[in-house]
Image: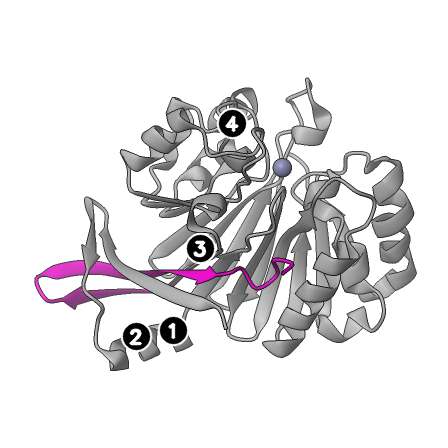
């Protein structure tokens, strides 16, 4: 059985405090009405699930550089089925195998059973490369009308996970140097809470977005740290503008996917920072987005949970 540990925080515009575990009644109330983000501990790669009640959005689904990751795809499908979730969106932040190589397996062999009535697949429109075209591209083509494919451009895209979770997606197509890294950025608004997910990005791309109309969407309470904590992402200008209170990275101890000191320091100055390598498990952030008073503190209650070992981690 995995071991689960939790911490609770109250966030308000001017501060963040760790608070003692609230009453069981309040925890239950918050959890059953929450927006939840899970960053799975998948090693080199990224696999994230956002859920509200029984609807979910998958943001990337991959790990390890290989053509197809069947183990992860099967484990993810089992998890989604076990939780009785339906996917209404799949967001491919950028076309790299370590972010997407489990999705073809997820969607084949009864894969449509985990899809909601209407499903949209969002990507940045860049070339998938040979391996992903042969696997994921073929599966998406086979699904035909069961899934709508949208290439997110500079004018962005929007969809609703539920009537109270609005999602904005944007890509800055003006930035040319590394087309694959024009990651789809994703902002989720839920009551008094805002989450931002950033794929893999470089400083120059962040700066380009900061200087665009998308800048307003970059502010957040919860940040999925870009590029596995690489120092080539999360510039000081970006971090200061976004000003997240809870930041989470998908990391691995292979040298190239570590949460680097400069990024950790920069984000720790703003709030709490978590990464999957250090915690050795899945990181779950949940909130009901409700403004409330708890003891002497007013704000929005967040729970950060670590599940060890990760539920999709091969044993
Ligand atoms: Zn990556």
Outermost top residue: 177
Q: CA distance from mark 4 to mark 2?
A: 36 Å
> Residue 199: horizontal and vertical position, in percent?
59, 39
Q: Which residue matches tag 1?
A: 31
Proximity of marks 4 and 1: CB atoms separated by less than 8 Å: no
Q: CA distance from mark 4 to mark 1?
A: 33 Å
Instruction: Work out whether 234 lies above or below 53.
Output: above
For the C terminus, the quadrant is bottom right
Instruction: Work out whether 173 lies above or below 224.
Output: above
Name the side, left or right, on which 265 lies relative to 249: left
Q: Which residue matches tag 3?
A: 189
**Ligand 1, what quadrant?**
top right
Q: Nearer the viewer, mark 3 or mark 4?
A: 4
Proximity of marks 3 and 4: CB atoms separated by less than 8 Å: no
Q: Which mark is residue 27?
A: 2
Q: What's drawn in magenta, residue-wise?
A: 287-315
Q: Nearer the viewer, mark 4 or mark 2?
A: 2
Dot 2: what SS?
helix
Q: Which residue matches tag 4?
A: 206
Q: CA distance from mark 1 to mark 2?
A: 6 Å
Q: CA distance from mark 3 to mark 4?
A: 20 Å
Q: Is residue 289 magenta-colored?
A: yes
- Label 4 vs 2, first from the N-terminus: 2
Label 2 Cα neighbours within 10 Å, binned few <14 / some 14-19 / many ≥20 = some
């Amino acid at each position: 059985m995995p071991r689960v540990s939790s911490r609770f925080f109250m966030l308000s515009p001017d501060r963040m405090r760790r608070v003692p575990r609230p009453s069981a009644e309040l925890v239950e109330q918050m959890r059953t009405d929450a927006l939840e983000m899970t960053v799975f501990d998948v090693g080199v790669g990224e696999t994230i699930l956002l859920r509200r009640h029984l609807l979910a959005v998958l943001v990337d689904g991959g790990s390890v550089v290989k053509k197809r990751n069947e183990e992860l795809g099967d484990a993810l499908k089992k998890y989604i089925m076990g939780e009785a979730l339906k996917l209404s969106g799949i967001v491919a932040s950028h076309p790299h195998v370590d972010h997407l190589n489990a999705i073809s397996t997820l969607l084949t062999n009864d894969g449509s059973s985990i899809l909601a009535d209407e499903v949209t697949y969002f990507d940045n429109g860049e070339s998938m490369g040979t391996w992903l075209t042969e696997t994921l591209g073929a599966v998406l083509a086979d699904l035909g009308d069961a899934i709508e494919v949208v290439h997110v451009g500079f004018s962005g895209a929007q969809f609703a996970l539920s009537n109270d979770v609005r999602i904005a997606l944007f890509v800055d197509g003006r930035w040319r140097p590394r087309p694959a890294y024009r990651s789809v950025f994703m902002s989720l608004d839920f009551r008094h809470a805002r989450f931002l997910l950033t794929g893999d990005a470089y400083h120059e791309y962040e700066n380009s977005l900061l200087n665009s109309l998308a800048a307003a969407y970059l502010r957040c309470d919860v940040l999925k740290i870009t590029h596995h904590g690489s120092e080539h992402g999360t510039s000081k200008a970006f971090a200061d503008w976004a000003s997240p209170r809870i930041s989470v990275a998908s990391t691995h101890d292979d040298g190239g996917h570590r949460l680097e000191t400069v990024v950790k320091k920069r984000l720790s100055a703003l709030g709490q920072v978590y990464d999957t390598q250090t915690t050795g498990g899945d990181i779950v952030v949940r909130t009901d987005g409700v403004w409330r008073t708890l003891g002497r503190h007013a704000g929005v209650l967040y729970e950060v949970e670590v599940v060890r070992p990760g539920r999709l981690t091969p044993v």
